[in-house]
Every structure is written in structure tokens, then in C-alpha cells.
Image: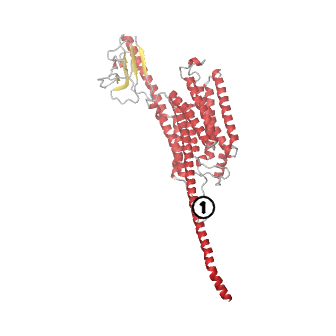
Amino acid sequence: MEKEKLDRTHVGLQFLMMMLSLLAFLILACFVGEIVWITDFQYFVVLISGVFAIFIGLIALLRYYTQKANLIFLLLGIGFLAVGLLDIVQLVIDVGGFETLFVYRPGEVYPFSAILSRGFLSLILFLSWLSAERIENGESLIEAERRVVLLVVTLFISFSGVVSYFILSNVISESLWVVMVGTATLMLLLLSFVGHMFRKGWKYDNFAFWLIFAISFLILSQIFFLPFLNIEYYSMVNLSIWAKFFSYLALLTGFLNSIYEMYQRELLTQRELERKNRLLDETKKKVEEAYLVVRKEKWDLVRGKKKSTPVKKKSGKGSKK
Amino acid sequence: MLVLLKILLYYIFMQDNKAAEGLGIDLLYEPHQTNTGSNGKKVSSEGFSFLDFFVIISAFFVIAFLGYLVLNPDKQGADERNVHRSADISSILTSLSNHINSTGEIPDNIPVNKECVAVGNEICKIGPYNCKGLVDLSFLADPAKENVLSLPSDPVSKSVNGTGYYISQDGQGNVTVCAPYAERNVQISFTKYVF
């Protein structure tokens, strides 16, 4: 079945909105150093982001299991549950009050714990592009579903395992590692962005646009985190986390929009079905009426023949005579 | 790699004025449909809209802002001025400390106040200025003494008579000089025990 294209103006407005949002965020970054009340939102926003990520994961899974059509929802659903978990792990590692649980001081492993969820999220988004490509090439859904679940779970276990090992064994203490992993994360995000843009799903599906929107804010978040920009360090960390939070918001909007569209489509299908049923009823009535008319005419014809037959016979006989 | 190759091919074809069909690539929309007009020339049926123009301009601005933030001349200027302020209040405090060491007492006109930034704590400029309601430290610039200091002013202070720097003491030998006009939320304040 050929997909229906979205209105060109609608798509254009969507991209304009994305660019203006990015621009507004960058303008905020220009003036953030002068704003007195912005001090340190880090832990607060990380906590909200973690909870949000779990919520987004659940919504994505709900969307997938409501109508099993797009594997990206499954991938993002499981992925975001893991990302939420990693966000909360980061918070537990960094915040004081849990010192007795670990062998290191809070904040000692901060830079590396901060890239846990970012790294994993970039992997998931990159995979979302790859899986979308594969599904479009006609792979069977059940087979692909099994692969996606296995892949994400394996990735999560191996990623968390390797990183935790490095953190706990104090192998990684240099910030150079953080910059390297952060750069790799940025590269994956850029590839995902380019991939989703050229896949052109945004021409047909609003969710594809929201995915691109989220990736663009994640790229901004990573640029602020690394840090490439000339802003105060605490402002950069704050802005980075805010950008990540906005990207989560964008994805949530995308999922909710997708669910809304699905129900709207169902509603339209139902209306169309009702309309067709009505038409069918009307046609049936007309057919019945037509049948009755034909039957009556036939009856009349037969009766007329019966009536006219003796006359004809008479005349026939007469003529014969 | 595949994507990069596709982009490269797209631009090669675009340079040759050929459609990049089969590559599955366009910038934002499908390649414009072209119809043949009455004069035989090709006419584009789907032009470049105002909205496209806005999207491209705003994308350009996003990149430009990122570039601006990499350099951030505002912050560089503010950082330089803050360094200047730090040096200024440090030199004022050092001169004052030397003066107190030579006289053995803190000048009476330095107000006793826990808060450095308060009305009446601003240091007055040296010269033909009205120092009423300000802290007069002109004794630091007495040419007869060794501690000659031309009192510096804050780079952004628009005060006519004041320097933009404030001074206070806690009454127990601690003198604080601060720069409340420091930019980008930076707190610049030095305290020294002068005895």
C-alpha cells in the first residue's frame, strides 16, 4: 500500500518550528551567563529526565503493542526504559547520601557516569535508523521483533557492564576518555540525524519528524556537554541537560501524536465503514425495490397475457376462420 | 559510509544538472516536477516557496549562532574586564594594607559594615570629584608618600564621582574590597586582615 504524503506546507512549518526552537535555545545560551537565577539545575533536571525517559519507554511500548506496524517504537520503547535506568544510576552515583553503597566518593566518577545514558541513547537512535531501513526492505515483523529485543538487551548489558567495570576499577580516571566517548556519541547522533533525514520518513509520518527534532536537540546537548563552546562550565552542563530534556519532550510529543493519529485513523476507518454500510443498505433497499417493481411488472405482464390470450385466441381463431 | 557516498553522488549529479533519480535523495522535498511549456522550455510546477526560504535562513542562523558561541566575544570581553577588576581591587587592597601598616590604624572613613555592597561604601575617584557619600581614599595617592596609587575605576561603571568599587571593614581588622559590577554572575571580592 502506498503511503500518503503529508501536506508540503505542514512539513515546511514543522521544520521551521524545529529551526526556530534550536535558535531560541542558542540565544538563551548566549545570555545564560547574565541570568542571575540560573545556578545549578543539574540534578533536578537529570531526575526529571530519568523519570521522563521511563515514561516515554512505556508510551512507546504501548504504541507498538497497540498496532504492531513500526519496529522503531519497540526499539525506542526498550531503549528508553534502559536510558531512564541509566539516568537514575547517574543520579545515584553523583548525589551525596548514597556514599555507603559504593567504594568511591560521589562526584569522583561524574564525567563518565554522565555519558552513560547519552552514549546508550545515541546507539539506540542509530539503531532506530538501521532497523527502519531493514523493515522497509521487507524483513518479516516477527523475526525483526525478536532480533530487536535481543539486540537492545545485549547492548544494554554489555554497555553497562563494560562501563561499570571501567568505573569501578578506576581504569578510567582521565577526562580524555570522556571526551573520546562523548565524541563517538556525537558522531552516532550526527549519523542518525543524516540517516533519518535522507530516509525521508518525515514526508509521510509526523513521528519521523519528531524523531529528527529530538536528535537535533540531542546533538546540541552533546555539543554543550563536550564542551566546544565558550560559555561558563556550569552553564554548559546545565544547558546540555536542558537540551536532553527537550529532546525527551519532543519524542514524547511524537509518540503521543502517533497514538492520536492512530486513533484518528481508526475513527476515520470506522466512519468510512459506517458510510459504506449505509450505502450498502441503501443499495440493498433499491435492489429490493427494483426487484419488487420487476416482479410486479412481470406479474402484470403474465396477468396481461392471461387476460389477452383468449382475445388473441378468439381473434386468431377468427382470422383463421 | 553509504549515506556519505549517496550525498556525494547527489551533488555530482546536481552539478551536471541531471536528476539524481534512483539515489533516493533530495534535500527536503521530491525533485520538482517539470512540465514542458508552450515554447518548449521546461517549467517548474513546484517552485521554491517562501517557507523553504525561511527554513534555510533559520538553519543558517542556527549554524551561525553555534559559530558565535564557539568564539563568544561577549564572554571573552566580560572575562577580560573581570580580570581587570580583580587586578584593580587587589591593587587597592594592597595599597591600603601598606598604608595601614605604616600608620598602624584603619582609616576612619572606611565604613564598618558586614556587607561590602551598601550605600556609602563606594570608593570615590581621586581628583576634582565630589566625594560626599563616598569613601575618600585620596590619602593613598599622596605624592609625598611611597604608596602612590591612581585609583582605578570599574570598566562599566557610569558613576560620575565613584569608581564602581566598594570597600568595608568588619571592625576586627578585616578589610574587604569588592567589584559589584562584575559580569556574568562572577563574584569578585577580596578580604585581607590588615594588622
Q: Quadrant of residue B195?
A: top left
Q: Is residue A201 left or right of residue B76?
A: right
Please identify the quadrant where the C terminus of chain A is shown: bottom right
- Disc 1: which chain? B
Left or right of residue A142: residue A39: left
Q: Answer with the quarter of the image where residue A293 lies.
A: bottom right
Residue A308 position, x and y percent, is 62, 79
* Side of B121 relative to B186 (left or right): left
Instruction: Residue A130: give x, y in percent of width and height.
Output: 66, 41
Question: Is residue B28 positioned above or below A113 on the image?
Answer: below
Q: Nearer the viewer, residue A204 or B165?
A: A204
The answer, for residue A187, to whether it is visible in the render is no
Q: Nearer the viewer, residue A77 or B77?
A: A77
Residue A220 % position (x, y):
55, 36
> Between residues B4 and B179, which one lies in front from this camera angle?
B4
Using residue A7 as the reference point, say whether residue A166 is left or right of it.
right
Q: Amino acid at mark 1?
A: Asn
Question: The residue tagged with tag 1: helix, strand or loop?
Answer: strand
Residue, far bottom = A321
Residue shown at 57% from the left, 33% from the top: A54
Percent across and percent down for residue B41 are 60, 63
**Crowdedness near tag 1: few (<14), some (14–19) or many (≥20) residues, C-alpha within 10 Å:** few
Q: Number of numbered discs present?
A: 1
Task: Tell me the residue that label 1 is attached to.
Answer: B35
In this view of the protein, can residue A92 be seen by the observer?
yes
